[in-house]
Image: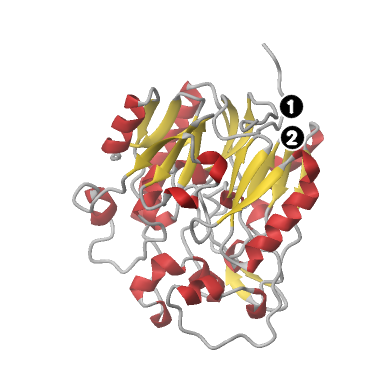
Amino acid sequence: MKEYPVVNSHNHWDKLEEVILGIPYHLDYDTDISFRLFFYLNLRQYGIAKGLNIKPSNQIRDESLEDIKVLEKILKDEGVIIKRPTEMTEVMETKSPWWEAHMGHALMSRDLFIVVGNEIIETPPQLRSRYFERDLYNELFTEYFKQGAKWTAVPKSRLMDRNFDYSYAIENGLQMEPQKAPFYEIMFDGAQILRMGKDMFFNCSNENHRLGMMWMQRHLGDRYNIQEVNITDSHIDGMVLPLKPGVLLVNRLVKLEQLPEKLRNWKIIWYEPLEKTEAVSWYDDVKGSDIPLLASESIGMNVLSLDDKKVIVQDIQKPLIKALQENGFEPIPCRWRHGRILGGGFHCMTLDIRRQSKLESYFD
């Protein structure tokens, strides 16, 4: 059996051998401008100017831990090695010379990192509450580095008010005064990028993202072709996910012409977001509460591929499970009750560290 480097991943579908799974401690967020801007499309219904109650209950934390134990068992039963970031159960206050923020949870491992081949790349967060979150992964990454992995960090923004490009939110209804002397800096998350071997598709909605795409292309060089796509505000894995060469899972909200031309001839499994009546568990959890839902209904398509057939999917996504089966996949249902509150699904919660993959082109 071929042995792969300790860190090795070139796509989202080859057989998964090792993964980092996040931890839902602690469930708390800051409501500064970076938070309200990043989650603008989902927060605007709550009247974000009035402030928010965003301290989920211990019940939500405990039930999330229960669900993650089930996910862990599925992964272990499939022979996947699981690593976890450092656990931090108390709210930590952080500051820079320009702002103060409370750290959030370290659950969404996909967001702040991207693995390209044998290299871990730390991406520069757009949320002030996540500025120091990478520290919780430092011991893991140090061990990977000692075993031969590359480890790189993209330059971080200062995250000053004038460093943010507000144009996308303004185009979608945000009312605000024009910024004085704006100076855009690099900000993006790993979850904005789809990795398909030598081709990568980078979702951009503002100049912060485009600077990040420019950095990635220069850093990775001519071996990779990075193409801009404009599908959503930030993370693309609630809109488009490749399941294997030639097959895409695509949200019904995405128009075909929004996909890169080279992907339009791939087979598409269309995802229909569940109606409220079908997804009772998503809504009963927050009945009578003003806790905001950070993720839309589309988080239901945020699946994790164990290989080019087996796919971990939220158990209530019955139409998606059926569609996957009809297209030759083997969906593995798993309960995940509070993904919309926490802002992510199975793909968001995990960071591929090692897959049985090699660098190749799927579009020659």
Determine the secondary structure under disc 1: loop
Q: Residue furthest left?
A: 277
Q: Is residue 238 above or below residue 143?
A: below
Query: x and y percent of residue 306 in the render?
Result: 50, 28
- What residue sits 68% from the left and 81% below the top? 182
Q: Is residue 56 above or below residue 15?
A: below
Cα separation, mark 2 vs mark 1, equals 7 Å
The residue labelled by disc 2 is 118
Amino acid type of the residue tagged 2 in the rendering: Asn
- What residue sits 79% from the left and 51% below the top? 218
Q: Is residue 157 above or below residue 230?
A: below
Query: x and y percent of residue 101 in the render?
Result: 59, 71
Q: Residue furthest top?
A: 1
Q: State which quarter of the image contains the C terminus.
A: top right
Could you tell me if the residues under marks 2 and 1 are in contact, i.e. CB atoms within 8 Å?
Answer: yes
Quarter holding residue 13? top right
Question: From this viewpoint, is residue 329 visible?
Answer: yes
- What residue sits 69% from the left and 26% below the top? 358
Query: x and y percent of residue 139 in the render?
Result: 71, 44
Quarter holding residue 354? top right
The residue labelled by disc 1 is 5
Residue sitting nearer the eye, 175 or 153: 175
Query: x and y percent of residue 168 in the render?
Result: 52, 70
Q: State which quarter of the image contains the N terminus.
A: top right
Amino acid type of the residue tagged 1 in the rendering: Pro
In this figure, what is the number of numbered marks? Answer: 2
Question: Mark 1 or mark 2, which is nearer the start of the sequence?
Answer: 1
Numbered tag placed on residue 254 in the rendering: none
Residue sitting nearer the eye, 148 or 198: 198
